[in-house]
Image (cartoon, helix red, strand yellow):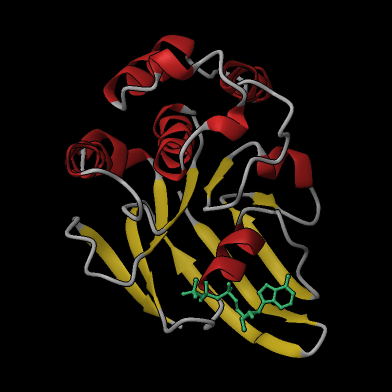
Amino acid sequence: MELRIEQLSFEYASHPLFSQFNLQLGNGITWLRGENGAGKTTLMKLAGGALTPHGGHIWLDDLELQAQPLAYRLQCYYCGGDTPQLPWLTVREVLDMHVSLYAGADAELLNAELAAFHLLPTLDQPVTTLSLGQHKKMQLSLALSLPVRLLLIDEPFNGLDVDAVAYLRQQLAAPERLARQCILLTSHLEPQLPLVQTVQL
Ligand SMILES: Nc1ncnc2c1ncn2[C@@H]1O[C@H](COP(=O)(O)OP(=O)(O)OP(=O)(O)O)[C@@H](O)[C@H]1O
């Protein structure tokens, strides 16, 4: 599996960020580094199809984002620090929506992740009532269980309690996962994970 970004350009109104930018990632974990404001989150959103490039091409294997945007997006999951997109839903409804969107999603696997993160008691709460750390755990439960080829995780360990950090490290480092998924993560601290590549922005 491979993520390929070629000749990418992107700018915010007053802020050029990427010009003729290239990146190629294979299976396993890539650590995306860079100072505050370097563009790490923006790059992850571009790679996940949440932002549209102003130029260039992005492929996941033979799927080109611009040519097959829906099919491409269904092979990615972006786990960011954003607040809930659909604030009127319960936690269960947010999760169900993802399970029904992603073909092959395994509800039992998702349940196991929710249990590991101690989120089962929260399922019927409005998603807006989750704490920051619980919201992160909900997103991480999806990240760890959805059958996607590309995982994009912004600051995976921020806001997590000690047990959750240890659990997440163990899950991300599982050899079976590293062999089948391309994982791009940002972290200001050394992630202490088996890395295949470090990219400095
Ligand atoms: N929606 C937006 N509109 C305008 N400018 C933006 C927007 N989002 C981000 N930026 C700007 O783009 C630059 C890159 O932001 P981005 O969030 O990608 O950086 P980052 O490397 O993830 O930073 P950090 O390490 O602080 O999270 C920053 O200067 C930021 O102010």
x, y (%) of residue 85?
Answer: 70, 41
x, y (%) of residue 62?
Answer: 63, 49
Looking at the picture, tell me which residue is in the foreground, 5 or 85: 85
Ligand 1 lies in which image quarter?
bottom right
Image-based side of 169 in relation to 141, left or right: left
Q: Quadrant of residue 191?
A: bottom left
Count of marks overlaid on the render: 0
Looking at the picture, tell me which residue is in the foreground, 28 or 36: 36
Residue at image location 33% in from the left, 16% down from the top: 112
Image-based side of 194 in relation to 90, left or right: left
Q: Residue furthest top?
A: 108
Q: Quadrant of residue 72?
A: top right
Q: Is 126 placed above or below 65 here?
A: above
Residue at image location 52% in from the left, 83% down from the top: 38
x, y (%) of residue 36?
Answer: 47, 81
x, y (%) of residue 100?
Answer: 66, 17
Image-based side of 127 in relation to 68, left or right: left
Q: Is 144 placed above or below 182 here?
A: above
Residue at image location 41% in from the left, 81% down from the top: 34
Q: Is 81 placed above or below 141 here?
A: below
Residue at image location 73% in from the left, 34% down from the top: 86
